[in-house]
Amino acid sequence: MKKKLVTWELISQSLQQGIPVMLLYVLQSAGSSPGRQGFFMAVNAVGNIAGSIGGGIMEFKFVEMAREQLLQEATIAAVRRQVHDKSSPADQSGMICSGEQTILLYRVRSHDAQLIQQIITCLADSRNGALQLSPAGLQFITAPGHTGFSMQSVDDWVYTERLGYRDHLYLVGGGHCSLAFSRIMATLDFYIHVYDNRPQLNTFEGNEYAHEKVVVEDYCQLKDIIPEGHHHYVVVMTMGYRSDDIVIRALLHKQFRYLGMLGSQAKVTQLFERYKAEGVSPQLLQRIHAPVGIPINSQTPEEIAVSIAAEIIRERNTPSC
């Protein structure tokens, strides 16, 4: 989210200083295109750049194109299709990674300044809204929307993108692994909630990456605190077996996109055998990622954080039924 803010702030500053600035936005992508839908960047007339539309020779070409067009006085809102295949009969990007993307070049106008500030405020305050792009220009919508693109012709298209945090990460436990994990996930556009029952724990108090930190008297309260959701990811990493057990029992019957528990295989086996003996269905237990993370023989909190982040990224990027 911070990277997005940097790009919008460059646009805002350029407008305030009277410097022409161009917004480049990936409206659509397919295949192995390096620029995914929603990637964007800003280029101004004095050479300042922020953001990315995928990098490589294609991005370099579009930056140069933006700079040339900024020398013109006319308002520009052009859509360009780029095919990453040198055998394509048209619209070659110069890259060979396959796939394609559709890119908007939009010369931001002075009267867009207030709208740009609304977007900045929305992102900075972790609120939700929607950005709409069309041949008519930019529009900010306070109600959150769904990202999508439809195009009838170069003069008849609309792109809508949800702004703010879609994905929420709930970390139960505020220790060293939680701190290292928060640091990584803060770079991946997750809104991070951390819960612990130790109010003066130094790693909990010093976690500057979490958006919300909540002290709970009893972990069983999480049943009423952590909401279900298709974009909700939960990782249990408390200080021990007994507290992990309390959290899992509180959350076991709730629907999340991801539920994981940190711990050794021996701990997981012992805990799950106990649940099975109590009549918990195997289907419920199969939904829990435990031990959490992909197996990379991780040892340190930082390595553990990488393994969990990789597993969550894989889950987030896997189409759900």
Image: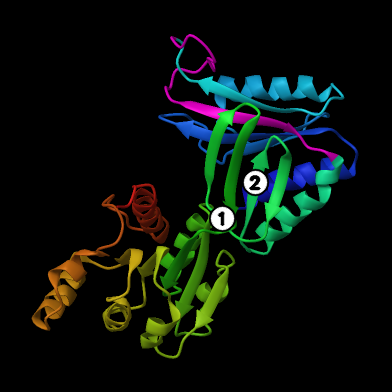
Q: Does residue 32 appear in this view?
A: yes
Is the residue under label 2 in contact with that under label 1 (CB below 8 Å)?
Answer: yes
Residue matched to label 2? 132
In this orientation, which residue lies closer to the viewer: 154 or 84?
154
| Residue lying at 81% horizontally and 25% vertically, measured from the top left | 70
| 103 in magenta | yes
Specify the amino acid type for callout 2: Gln
- Kindly state the secondary structure of the residue where label 1 is placed: loop
Place of residue 208 in the rendered image (x, y in percent of width and height, measured from the top left): 59, 67
Furthest-bottom residue in view?
Answer: 217
Q: Does residue 52 appear in this view?
A: no
| Residue lying at 45% horizontally and 81% vertically, measured from the top left | 225
Specify the amino acid type for callout 1: Gly
* CA–CA distance in space, label 1 to label 2: 9 Å
Image position of 290 (left or right of 178): left
Residue matched to label 1? 145
Furthest-right residue in view?
Answer: 18
Q: Residues within 10 Å of mark 1 (few under 14, many from 20)?
A: some
**Eyeballing the image, is 251 above or below 32?**
below
| 183 in magenta | no
Which of the marked residues, 1 or 2, is nearer the chain's N terminus? 2
Range drawn in magenta: 87-109
Picture quadrant where residue 277 is located:
bottom left
